């Protein structure tokens, strides 16, 4: 099996947005279908996925990227990386190795910034953390707050790209449902107000910006 980037879809997002590589080149590098890469470029899939730079995580060199951008027929060659490969977990609570637990605050910080729709419960399930830890990172009361460096949890080996994407889609659907429900409730109240004849407050127009309120009082004498 050919090597592929740690986060194929997120890597494809970054390559589409930041390079002049062809869809075919990106598809070959990420082991994705060319039509799926084109859908990413069209904004039809991978919506909300934060792109991952394969150069910063040592899976691609700048020289190799430059070579392939200059030759549309060239094929990107992935660099060997010593980064951990996350494994999909079975049912039940997630176990995080002791060596990885110190990196969870970095992952929490990244998720709070890049996946704000995720609930605390989702974060707990995704990377095996606790709500007190999430809150301490959020309000910067964590004991190691000055040294927290936001990092993608997939890169850290705390979850898989598929798990992160699934959580993100769930959060997006929940947010969309909430917005739809709020709009429906607002429409219902507006309809009730119209049916009962309750007058709606009219907005008060502000005075023209170049005019000041008139006054009948003469100016005060010295």
Image: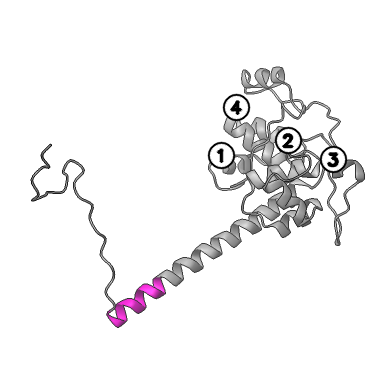
Front residue of 82 and 29: 82
Report, in whole angstroms, how far the alpha carbon at label 1 lies from the one at label 3.
Answer: 27 Å
Identify the element where label 2 is drawn: helix
Report, in whole angstroms, how far the alpha carbon at label 2 lies from the one at label 4.
Answer: 34 Å
Q: Which residue is mark 1?
A: 41
Image depth: mark 3 or mark 4 in front:
3
Identify the element where label 1 is drawn: helix
In the drawing, does residue 127 fall left or right of residue 98? left
Report, in whole angstroms, how far the alpha carbon at label 3 lies from the one at label 4.
Answer: 26 Å
Q: Which residues are magenta?
A: 187-197
Q: Position of residue 212 (x, y in %)?
A: 17, 45
Identify the element where label 3 is drawn: loop
Report, in whole angstroms, how far the alpha carbon at label 1 lies from the one at label 4.
Answer: 12 Å
Please tell me whether residue 153 is drawn above or below residue 191 in the rendered image: above
Q: Which residue is mark 3?
A: 85
Q: How many marks?
A: 4
- Residue at 85 percent across and 59 percent down: it is 93
Image depth: mark 2 or mark 4 in front:
2
Front residue of 71 and 165: 165
Do tag 2 and tag 4 residues touch (Cβ < 8 Å)? Answer: no
N-terminal of the pair, mark 2 or mark 4, is 4
Q: Position of residue 113 (x, y in %)?
A: 64, 44
- Residue at 78 percent across and 57 percent down: it is 125
Front residue of 18 and 92: 92
Image depth: mark 2 or mark 1 in front:
2
Give the crowd class for mark 4: few <14, some 14-19, many >=20 residues within 10 Å: few
């Amino acid at each position: 099996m050919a090597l592929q980037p740690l986060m194929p879809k997120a890597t494809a997002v970054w390559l589409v947005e930041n390079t002049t590589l062809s869809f075919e080149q990106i598809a070959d590098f990420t082991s994705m279908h060319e039509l799926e890469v084109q859908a990413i470029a069209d904004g039809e899939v991978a919506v909300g996925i934060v792109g991952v730079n394969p150069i910063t995580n040592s899976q691609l060199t700048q020289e190799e990227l430059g070579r392939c951008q200059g030759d549309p027929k060239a094929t990107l060659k992935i660099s060997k990386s010593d980064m951990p490969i996350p494994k999909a977990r079975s049912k039940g609570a997630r176990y995080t190795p002791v060596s990885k637990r110190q990196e969870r605050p970095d992952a929490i910080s990244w998720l709070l910034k890049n996946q704000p729709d995720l609930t605390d419960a989702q974060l707990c399930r995704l990377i095996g953390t606790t709500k007190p830890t999430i809150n301490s990172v959020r309000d910067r009361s964590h004991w190691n707050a000055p040294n927290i460096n936001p990092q993608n949890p997939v890169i850290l080996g705390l979850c898989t790209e598929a798990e992160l994407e699934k959580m993100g889609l769930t959060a997006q659907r929940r947010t969309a449902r909430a917005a739809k429900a709020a709009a429906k409730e607002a429409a219902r109240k507006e309809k009730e107000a119209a049916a009962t004849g309750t007058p709606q407050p009219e907005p008060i127009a502000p005075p023209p910006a170049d005019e000041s309120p008139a006054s009948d009082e003469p100016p005060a004498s010295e």
